[in-house]
Image (cartoon, rainbow, N blue to C red):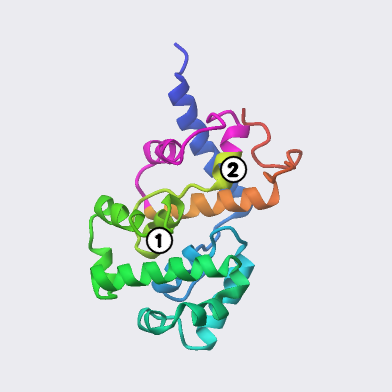
Amino acid sequence: MGISSREKIEQSIRVIYQRLYKKFGSQHWWPAQTKFEVMVGAILTQNTNWGNVEKAIQNLKHNKQLSVEALRKLSVSELVSLIKPAGYFNVKAKRLKNFIEFLQREYKGDILKMRKEPLGLLRDKLLSVNGIGPETADSILLYALDKPIFVVDAYTKRFLYRHNLIPQNASYEAVQSIFMSCLKGDIQLFNEYHALIVRLGKEFCRTKALCEHCPLNDIK
């Protein structure tokens, strides 16, 4: 008896992880010194590359503004001047201020208190903050709060579609459910897998694919 399409997908998801890990090794992602820095980075990295985010975060650190209290006291215009390297700085400054207000209102700025919230409830609360979508919310949950949820980004959708594992118009939730159902709910595994997908997207599965030497080139 042949295996089902669902079984094929599950098998592919596991094989893909093994191939990527063998090729790239551990990615040590997310690069940050504190959990709060991860949260700020998750908001600043929207629609830009990580190098630009690092510059913005260094500006905040250099000016001693990388804390809940410091960012709460900053005006939007002051914040804009510090995060300019991240691009879309006017929009991101407002989104960051929205998040800080949420963190202060719901948890008195206490990240440990925030972390104690159940995953589903906390995710809903994050998604209610203006400017925080599923990818940003899940990045905060996984990388800053150690919650077992898989982060989906454009790289994820691109490589899955190219390997005929999802339709081109698959929703964020549909893609996320593939990983959540095929893998055990392990925080470190979700962390590593997503980071490896980002590495794949940057080196091989680009807008113009470089398939010849890709570690996944024989997976159909």
Q: Position of residue 76 (x, y in %)?
A: 47, 77
What residue is shown with label 2? 19
Q: Which residues fall within the magenta stretch?
A: 159-186
Q: Within the magenta stretch, is there residue 179?
A: yes
Q: Nearer the viewer, mark 2 or mark 1?
A: 1
Q: In the depicted view, which residue is nearer to us: 74 or 20?
A: 74
Secondary structure under badge 1?
helix
Determine the image quadrant of residue 209.
Answer: top right
Which residue was labeled with disc 1?
Answer: 140
Classify mark 2: residues with Cα within 10 Å, few (<14), some (14-19) or many (20+).
some
Residue 8 to residue 121: above or below: above
**Residue 100 position (above or below residue 155):** below
Q: Which residue is drawn at the image coordinates 62% and 62% (left, top)? A: 49
Residue 79: in magenta span: no
In the rendered image, residue 34, in percent from the top left (x then y), is placed at: 42, 75
Q: Residue at x 24, y 53 (%)?
A: 121
Q: Amino acid under label 2?
A: Arg
Camera sees residue 38: no
Q: Horizontal and vertical percent for residue 81? A: 57, 80
